């Protein structure tokens, strides 16, 4: 069975949010259309406690987008975003949610960031997404959402790690840094993953 994962289509990652992805809202109509081709749709939701250690505001003298070592992992320091219960953490109101069967929240541990929908960045804790998909008989995953070079890529990377046939739907995502996305796209392809456009979707279902 094939499934679609909607990654972090939340207000803080949309223009006007605290960590906006350029044209992030432009993908929503396409994402809504894509859902109709899938028997199973799930979503991930960045869901940080206030004062998360990935926030620049949690570190004296540090500015957003600086890098630090956080418990042995390289950590980009972000503006405060997707704080639990805030409007910024909510899914965009134009995103259709009726077909979304389950939401997997991530980034809840204040000591470690979590880009992937499957694991935190240190692979210390699983969200349970892989087991859920296997229970549903899924073997082929399609990933869309925000942002292409971070949470979408890491979700796709871990889907490959879990041996799912994995596709990023490129025109249903946007990157923070398009050059950075080109680099990680090459990494995904090297791992056996795929990057397709939505008009090719029917060839892979």
Image (cartoon, helix red, strand yellow):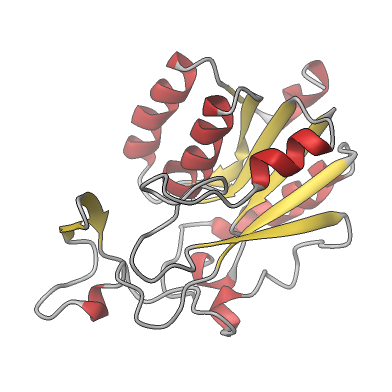
The answer to whether 187 appears left or right of 135 in the picture is left
Specify the quadrant that holds the N terminus. Answer: top right
Residue at position x 61%, y 38% in the image? 171
The answer to whether 57 appears left or right of 189 in the picture is left
In the picture, residue 68 is in which quadrant? bottom left
Q: Residue 93 in the image: x percent, y percent?
A: 74, 73
- Residue reaching furthest to the front: 124
Residue at position x 41%, y 83% in the image? 50
Residue at position x 53%, y 44% in the image? 152
Residue 197 sits above or below residue 149 on the image:
above
In the picture, residue 52 is in which quadrant? bottom left
Pick the front one: 17 or 52: 52
Q: Residue 181 in the image: x percent, y percent?
A: 40, 36
- Residue reaching furthest to the left: 61
- Can residue 4 be spotted in the picture? no
Q: Residue 19 in the image: x percent, y percent?
A: 41, 68
């Amino acid at each position: 069975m094939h499934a679609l994962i909607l990654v972090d289509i939340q207000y803080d990652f949309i223009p006007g949010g605290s960590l906006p992805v350029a044209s992030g809202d432009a993908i929503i109509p396409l994402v809504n259309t894509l859902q109709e081709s899938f028997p199973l749709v799930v979503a991930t939701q960045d869901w940080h406690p206030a004062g998360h250690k990935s926030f620049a505001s949690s570190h004296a003298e540090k500015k957003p987008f600086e890098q630090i070592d956080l418990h042995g992992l390289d950590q980009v320091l972000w503006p405060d975003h997707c704080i639990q219960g805030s409007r910024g953490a909510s899914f965009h109101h134009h995103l259709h949610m009726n077909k979304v069967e389950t939401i997997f929240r991530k980034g809840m541990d204040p000591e470690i960031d979590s880009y992937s929908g499957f694991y935190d960045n240190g692979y210390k804790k699983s969200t349970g997404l892989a087991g859920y998909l296997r229970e549903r008989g899924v073997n082929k995953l399609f990933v869309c959402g925000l942002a292409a070079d971070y949470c979408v890529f890491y979700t796709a990377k871990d889907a490959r790690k879990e041996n799912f046939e994995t596709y990023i739907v490129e025109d249903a995502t946007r990157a923070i840094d398009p050059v950075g996305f080109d680099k990680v796209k090459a990494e995904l392809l090297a791992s056996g993953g795929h990057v397709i456009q939505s008009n090719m979707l029917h060839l892979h279902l």
